[in-house]
Amino acid sequence: MSDTPALAIRDVRYAYGEHEAVRGVSFDVAIGEVFALLGPNGSGKTTLFRLISTLVPLQAGDIRVLGASVRDQATAVRGQLGVVFQAPSVDKKLTVLENMVHHGRLYGVPSSQLKQKARSMVERLGLGEKLGATVETLSGGQRRRVELAQAMLHDPRMLVLDEPATGLDPGARSDLWRYFTGLADEGVTIVLTTHLLEEAERADRIGIMHRGELAALDTPAALQASLGGDTLILRTTDGESLAAAIRDQFHLSPTIVDGTVRLEQPNGHELVPRLIESLGSQIDAVTLGRPTLEDVFIARTGHQFFQDSED
């Protein structure tokens, strides 16, 4: 396998007028890796998707797809990419096969191979019986599979997807991820954006975006383990007073997020009764659990995940 990463991003910056949407982001994605850019709306992940897929020109920094520069070799990059947008990109009035053939012609798939390749790809995604059906008669999950079939028709080496699971039911999401895993096993690199925490947990690695910057980068398990134990969430009417009392009496370092007091602590179950005994009058409720990706996001940014959106 080549030492060249499938995707190399170096100090990328992008601004819409006065608003800097991406602020000095750098990371690599290996060949055959399933990589998720996780973040709420306004975090900069969709801007990165647009830059990687050459939809908008690079302003600063460098992006290379399998060694080719998106700045100087955009045509070569596009030939290596399969792109799936968040908004539907299939013509709902055409049949599945008609959509596939039209897409294949745009990508220069030889006419002698086009219909057979289209049928093969659609069958691989479990839609063989829907070849002659108009797209408007398909379910949301089936339409998404048609878009994936289109994106893979020209045998790209990297698949880039913007919020691919949005609007899909749990069963369709599971089908989608089984397909991603199969592609990765064949050496196709998957790069996707998502605001769904449970979706990102399925990826090999995650880049957590926060207001245009990369707040964390690692495997889901490593990110969760980085918090060092259990997560305690203490609900109270006066977060500042409770946090101060915990610092004074227990010599710990709680954080306050939206009025709740949070602690990351090994063997958190042992701390709960001690907190209740000493500070029970200030505590309304206690939640104890293993760290989640949302806990990681809060620990790295100081913000709740779904309250971090920035227009």
Image (cartoon, rainbow, N blue to C red):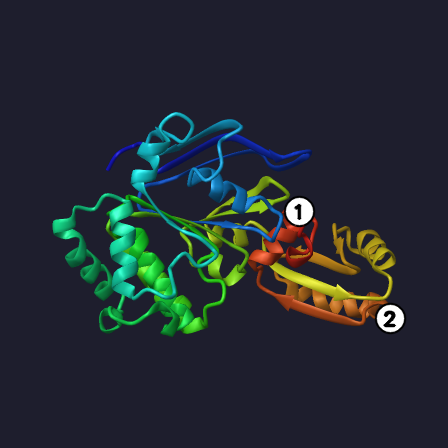
The amino acid at mark 1 is Thr
11 or 230: nearer the viewer: 11
Check disc 1 and report its element: helix, strand or loop.
helix
Determine the residue positioned at 39% across, 69% down: 141
From this view, report whether residue 56 is shown above or below residue 229.
Answer: above
Q: In what element is the residue under mark 2?
A: helix
Hey, which residue is sitting farthest front in the picture? Answer: 93
x and y, in percent, of residue 105 in the image: 25, 48
Tell me what residue is drawn at x 45 percent, y 68 percent.
168
* Label placed on residue 281: 2
Q: Nearer the viewer, residue 95 or 171?
A: 95
Structural distance between the alpha carbons of marks 1 and 2: 30 Å
Mark drawn on residue 66: none
The amino acid at mark 2 is Ser
Image quadrant in which you'd find residue 289: bottom right
Q: Residue at x 77, y 58 (%)?
A: 258
Q: Earlier in the sequence, mark 1 or mark 2?
A: 2
In the depicted structure, whether residue 303 falls above or below residue 31: below
Residue sitting at x 25%, y 52%: 153
Task: Tell me if residue 20 comes above or below residue 216 in the rendering.
Answer: above
Which mark, residue 301? 1
Position of 302 with respect to 62 (left or right) is: right
Residue contact between numbered discs 1 and 2, judged by CB atoms under 8 Å: no
Answer left or right for 119 relative to 280.
Answer: left
Quarter-wise, where is residue 1 in the image? top left
